[in-house]
Amino acid sequence: MDAVSRIGARGKRQAFWIEAAIVGAIALFLIIVMPVVLSNFRLNLLGRFLSLAIVALGIDLIWGYTGLLSLGHGIFFALGGYAISMHIKLEDADGGLPDFMSLYGGTELPWFWEPFYSFPFATFAVVTIPALLAGVLGYLVFRNRIKGVYFSILTQAATIVFFNFFNGQQKLFNGTNGLTNFQTLLGASVNTQSTQFVFYSLTIILLVGAYALCRWLTSGRFGRLLMAIRDDESRVRFSGYNPTEFKVLVFAVSGALAGIAGAMYTLQSGSVSPRLMDVAFSIEMVIWVAIGGRGTLVGAILGALLVNYARSFLSEQFAEIWLFFQGALFLIVVTVLPDGIVGWLKSQGIQSLRGRKQAFTYPSLEEDPEIQQERQELETKSSE
Amino acid sequence: MLIGLFDGLFNGISIGAVLLIAALGLAIVFGLMGVINLAHGELMMLGAYTTFVVQNAFRQFGEPFFEIYIFFALIAAFFVTAGVGLILERGVIRYLYGRPLETLLATWGVSLILQQFVRSVNWVLVIGLAVFCVLFFGGLWILNHRQNRAFHKWAIAALLPLSLGIAIAVGRFLADTYQLAVTRPWFGAQNVDVSAPTWLRGGLPLGNFQLPYARLFIIALTIVCVAGLYYFLQRSPWGLRIRAVTQNRSMSSCLGIPTQKVDALTFALGSGLAGVAGCAISYLGSVGPNTGQNYIVDTFMVVVVGGVGKLVGTIVAALAIGTVNYLVGSGTLAILFTPIQPLADFFTFFATTSMAKVMVFALIIAFLQVRPGGIFPQKGRTVDA
């Protein structure tokens, strides 16, 4: 090993520890300081938004890095929520039927509710059911090289389908009202302060874990491959890789993250209903990532927090404006700020403040490495 | 049995006709630009509201005119939505060519804005918007025609808040002076009802059941639209250009076809067709700000199944999806399979309108396993298939 790469490796290790320290410090700050500063209501809100940040990480993984725009993450999110709340409902029922079932004239437990008596299975299901569904759906779609807009609207259709399914099944899932009115989980009352604090802390730990996972996935060879799929899938295929496997895998991971997020969100909001599978909500998740900056993990988390705080602020103050504002947000983020806040700061925040203007040509030209090189040469020449 | 089959066929075709008329505009835009317009449903909703407005206007003229308002409504709906589509294309979408996913998000943003706009539109909002547009775009026009470009950027930066401030001030002033007369929403968040003229009510009696005239009208309208579009695309010079750009954009551009104009024209045409579709669906139920949302996903599925670039695909896909949807949703299949108990149970489980969509989606996914490019995929030799 020569000297240069050794220094590079040491620098990398150093950067890794610095990043780990920063993440740890922020997590500790959130766990220790925030409960003191914020009221219980605000802390609960923050906990919910942090769990939404976990989905945002998942979406960033498939959209920001792999270039697949999923408009159906609400499904996986809600499935995670349903998995954990089915366990809680069964524990509340104490061996009997969950309260809503007898209301609709159900006499026996549907077979697929049975395994949810066990808590380990329920937590396992929170991760695996969304991951499996995402994997199967992804396999069926990617296998045929269906991509781009097609993939997006298929996921959107899937969202409607699942919404209809859960909405229509009163006997199985309590239909529109969903599962609410949680009492106990593992013997502890769900609604007390201390339990909610445990959920809050758990959310932060899971968020850190998700961040670490995504960081690990995107930094190495695997991450470069994902970006290669995003930028030129045919070329990846020509180099001997099968993009389908990677896409399915990353879609499944992203679905699993959404499932975890949904479970944490449900525990803190105290209910899960088909409304989480609303088409609008799934697309909104995408905009969190877009605002924060796709292709940057920090951006996804920041975006989720930022947009949700803006939403809770605006809809508290003036409910009417929120939709206008949200619509404008979509327009602004794609036209003016395509890299999001973090991406903008990273790439050209400082430059554009200085007022340098770039000539606009066709996107295919912009991406052409040869032309970029020529442009750089021209710039260096003119500055000499 | 024969009557039942005919009933199923008629209902399937009539659902398919609604899907088809809604998907037509989407399909030509998608074929030409590879852009899926998520605001398409909202354009339909605007068309339906235009029908509502025209209907109210004609009600004042009295009986003989009210009977024929529907034709004026169709024309008005076409031009209103085509205009909105044109603004949308010129204002947003043309900056996003080559980035279809971003276009998806942008049009979703537009659809949110349109929904809320219909809910809260009143004179204050409209006048404020007009004032803002006149000030801002007028100012831009003047700035762009000046020779001195020294303070160009700063002038725009100052113009935006200035015109916004003036517009808001005018709106406030109006709201304070005229009170409820100008602040009352035109439509509000509630659904509005479009009443059909008398000749569209009732139905054609045929044996035991009757064919509703409204449904027949929609089928006829769909046929007219398809025929008109077909004629336009195949026989007119602009249709030729549209087809050329659909097949090969860069080559058409090299041959001197103004692709930008073709894009704008096609988008306006597609949006206008959405308006006509909106006019049609206003006779199927009440019209609300969320009306468009009920249709979009089904129409997207039509486009996916039909494949791009050929109208025939869209037609076949719409009719097929409509028929399957009806057969499953109405429980006809469940009755058909009564002898085989498990199958009958299976189909009974899906025999509601919303559960039928679950089934149709599964079938579409299965269909895409066999033909990923849709019924009539575009043939070509590019890798990117």
Image: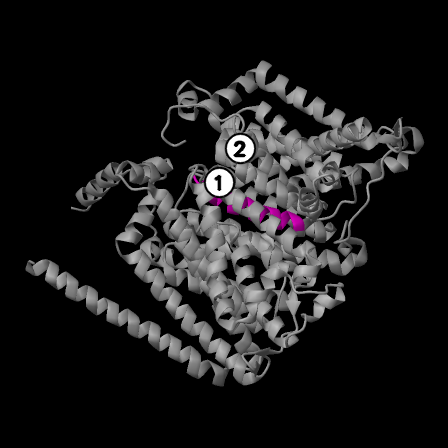
Q: Which of marks 1 and 2 is in front?
A: 1
Residues drawn in magenta: B99-115
- The type of residue carrying mark 2 is Phe
Return the residue at label 2.
Answer: B30
Q: How far apart are marks 1 and 2 (CA)?
A: 10 Å
- The type of residue carrying mark 1 is Val
Quadrant containing the C terminus of chain B is top left
Please state the horizontal and vertical placement of residue B244, each as a whole percent of the image: 48, 20
Of all residues shown, which one is farthest toward the right?
A: B63
Please state the horizontal and vertical placement of residue A193, each as a whole percent of the image: 56, 84
Q: Is residue A130 visible?
A: yes
Considering the whole magenta stretch, tell me its main secondary structure: helix
Question: Within 10 Å of the Cα at label 2, are there few (<14), some (14-19), or many (20+) other Cα atoms?
Answer: many
Q: Quadrant of residue B58?
A: top right
Chain ID, mark 1: A
Q: Does the magenta stretch include residue B103?
A: yes
Chain ID, mark 2: B
Q: B252 above or below A54?
A: above
Return the residue at label 1.
Answer: A149
Q: Nearer the viewer, residue B88 or A355?
A: B88
Q: Which of B149 and A328 is in front in this view?
A: A328
Q: Is residue A291 visible?
A: no
Please state the horizontal and vertical placement of residue B292, each as a whole percent of the image: 67, 44
